[in-house]
Image (spheres, rainbow, N blue to C red):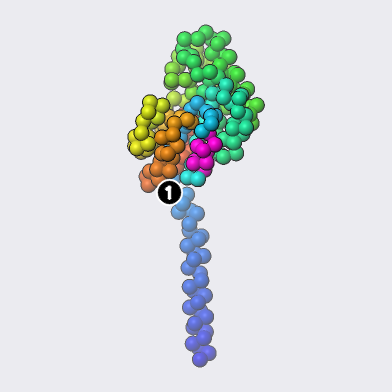
Amino acid sequence: MTTKRVLAVLAAAAALTVPAATTATAAPAQAAACNGYVGLTFDDGPSGNTTKLLGALRQNGLRATMFNQGQYAAANPSLVRAQVTAGMWVANHSYTHPHLTRLSQAQIDSEISRTQQAVANGGGGTPKLFRPPYGETNATVKSVAARYGLTEIIWHVDSQDWNGASTDAIVQSAARLTNGQVILMHDWPANTLAAIPRIAQTLASRGLCAGTISPQTGRAVAP
């Protein structure tokens, strides 16, 4: 009987070690699942939709770069802080969203500098990234942005959410992303909000993770 009891105890002990081994390998396996990184970006916030958007991103384990308009950041500093608290990165999208290429250098400077200040005042830090409205840029816009230490970021994939794209179409756009690429989305469309869970699933199925955007290369990298 004693021998049987010893064998039983040893068997039980061996069984208990299995979950521990599984747990030990879970973290490295999860990290290895990131075969590449993409940049999720949302323009034109913060808005009345920002809180829901942040909630959806957090619930689905996603981080993103929020290209805020300075006028909205100045009017809603608590939402700028909420973006940072939710783990997002805050960037500059001009103050009033004008066609910068039609403005004077002084006007461009005002648009960029006031947004830098509004974001900083809201607790978003000093932005390192800048997206010109409509993706319109020229040598003057680039030089003013550079004066404020900003890297200009356009996009590789346009979700067309600003143009009434359906939730399905937005998800399909995100599915086209490859390692290092950046997608354009917006803070306010309901269809974009609805697409977040499926975007997360689509990226995970391809081994892609949501990363930050490098000021050096303008491409998505590991956070």
Q: Position of residue 68 (x, y in %)?
A: 53, 26
The residue lying at 61 percent from left, 25 percent from top is: 75
Magenta residues (range): 50-58
Q: For this view, does 36 lie left or right of residue 147?
A: left
The residue lying at 49 percent from left, 87 percent from top is: 4
Q: Which residue is mark 1?
A: 33
Dominant secondary structure (helix, strand or loop) of the stretch shown in magenta: helix
Judging depth in this view, the residue of 41 and 145 nearest the camera is 41
Q: Position of residue 66 (x, y in %)?
A: 52, 31
Q: In the rendered image, is residue 156 in sight? A: no
Residue 40 occupies which quadrant of the picture?
A: top left
Q: Residue furthest bottom?
A: 1
Height in image: 199 above or below 43? below
User: Is residue 53 in the magenta section?
Assistant: yes
Q: In the rendered image, is residue 69 in sight? A: yes
Q: Amino acid at mark 1?
A: Ala
Q: Position of residue 92 (x, y in %)?
A: 54, 24
| Label tally | 1
The residue lying at 42 percent from left, 39 percent from top is: 194
Q: For this view, does 178 lie left or right of residue 30?
A: left
User: Is residue 115 in the magenta section?
Assistant: no
Q: Position of residue 154 (x, y in %)?
A: 44, 25
The residue lying at 50 percent from left, 45 percent from top is: 59
Q: For this view, does 143 lie left or right of residue 135?
A: right
Disc 1 is placed on an element classified as: loop
Label 1 environment density (alpha carbons within 10 Å; few <14, some 14–19, many ≥20):
some
